[in-house]
Image (cartoon, grey):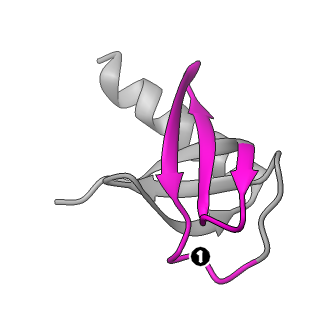
Amino acid sequence: MCLGIPGKIIELNEEEQWAVIECYGVQNKVYTQLVAEELAPGDYLMVHAGYAIGKIDREEAQDTLKMLEEITNT
């Protein structure tokens, strides 16, 4: 089973194809080579194993984070 976690882009390096994302107050560097869309700070990415696997909208990111919180708090 794979699990993607949404994160908000805090910093972006387009030349080296990585971004720093924040999720639950934790920041991580992820690679963005797999994402075809244009990215900017403030955008949300779905991340798995250190790689951004897609750009998602804010509402979808918040819904996913809410579900993850519900799962981990039960």
Residue found at x 73% / y 79%: 37
Point out the residue furthest to the front here. 15
Residue found at x 35% / y 16%: 73
Report the quarter where the C terminus lies. top left
| Left or right relative to 9: residue 20 | left
**Is 73 in front, or is 34?**
34
Magenta stretch containing residue 35, yes or no? Answer: yes
Magenta stretch containing residue 39, yes or no? Answer: no
Give the image location of residue 56, x and y in percent.
67, 63
The quadrant where residue 63 appears: top right
| Left or right relative to 35: residue 40 | right
Give the image location of residue 66, x and y in percent.
55, 33
Point out the residue furthest to the left here. 1
Point out the residue furthest to the bottom here. 36
Residue at the spot of label 1: 35
Kindly state the secondary structure of the residue where label 1 is placed: loop
Q: Amino acid at mark 1?
A: Val
**42 to 60, vertically: above or below:** above
| Left or right relative to 34: residue 72 | left
Residue found at x 54% / y 36%: 65
Report the quarter where the N terminus lies. bottom left
**74 to 37, vertically: above or below:** above
Within 10 Å of disc 1 (Cα), the crowding (few <14, some 14-19, many 20+) is: some
Q: How many marks?
A: 1
Give the image location of residue 5, x and y in percent.
45, 46
The quadrant where residue 57 appears: bottom right
**Is 14 in front, or is 8?**
14
Give the residues drawn in magenta, as a range: 11-37
Residue found at x 50% / y 35%: 28
